[in-house]
Amino acid sequence: MKRNANRPIGVFDSGVGGLTVAHAIKQRLPEESMIYFGDTAHLPYGEKSPEAILRYAERITRFLINQNCKMVVIACNTASSVAYIPLKEKFGEEVEIVNVIDPVVEYYLDHLAPARVGVIGTKATIRAGVYEKKIRENNPEARVFSKATPLLVPMIEEGFIFDDISNAVIRAYLSDEPLHSVEALILGCTHYPIIKNQISRFYNFSIEILDSAAIVARAVKELLTGKNLLYKEGSGKDVFFVSDYTEYFEKISGMFFEKTLTLKKLDLWKDG
Ligand code: DGL
């Protein structure tokens, strides 16, 4: 692995969700440059088979390595659930690979366990059961309740946020037990921080809602520091790629980064 720190951090997701993580990394590490890839052509990952998700994740990781990235952050719970271990086996010698699940599980175990915790995510994430497994392995007393909430990603990607439709969908998913009476909730999808405030309001702001953005950004800094790869003198240039152009991506990325981002369309699958 190349040891020079002045290389960019690669971040990818199926769409806008990973921008929640990308933004948190930028806030913590403004000098670092970033290359973001939103695989909008294959969104939503949560409805795809593990084989398809792995195929997309491998192609994007190879692209980010070719762009000279020192680290690849899988800013997607679905891809982290099914592709993290194979990606690490395949590319771990060439690049640091970070998933968004481990840092959140660690946070729960260190600060909240064994509180009754809910996990919401895409169908593929909940089917893989990685949160439950990792939490239970480390603390058998912990009570974890998972639920797939597949409407949330298309709802967010279509711009239904802070309105009656999103409130109704959130209520429909979270009103039943055991989720209604959990003491903490893990947002197991990087799209969900966009509606975190609404979810908190559903619980009358009375429980801790954990999302990966800030927790993962802290883990990224720790890992870069530990590996001597932190770059403090850079000017933080970022490039954003999407596999298919969507107007909403541009709009929401502007919301996060307080400026309109220039998106570059790049079809990594052009030749099959
Ligand atoms: N943002 C993603 C996640 O964290 C994926 C959503 C999707 O494409 O289904 O799971």
Image (spheres, grey):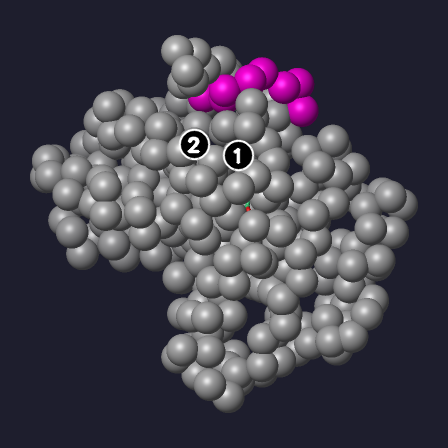
Question: To which quarter of the image does residue 251 belong?
Answer: top right
> Outermost residue toward the bottom?
141
Quadrant location, the C terminus? top left
Label 1 lies in ligand 1 vicinity (Cβ under 8 Å): yes
**Eyeballing the image, is 82 above or below 139?**
above
Say which element carries label 1: loop
Residue in view at x 69 percent, y 76 percent: 182
- Mark drawn on residue 56: 2
Residue range of the region highlighted in magenta in the rendering: 241-248
Residue in view at x 52 percent, y 63 percent: 129
Residue in view at x 25 percent, y 29 percent: 65
Give yes or no for contact between labels 2 and 1 (Cβ–Cβ under 8 Å).
yes
- Mark drawn on residue 14: 1
Query: What count of labels does the image hold?
Result: 2
Front residue of 103/84: it is 84
Q: Is 200 left or right of 169, judged from the image as shown?
A: left
Inspect the image, locate mark 1, and give the three-letter code of the amino acid beneath it. Ser
Question: From the viewer's perspective, is the residue at label 2 or at label 1 nearer?
Answer: 2
**Eyeballing the image, is 61 above or below 261?**
below
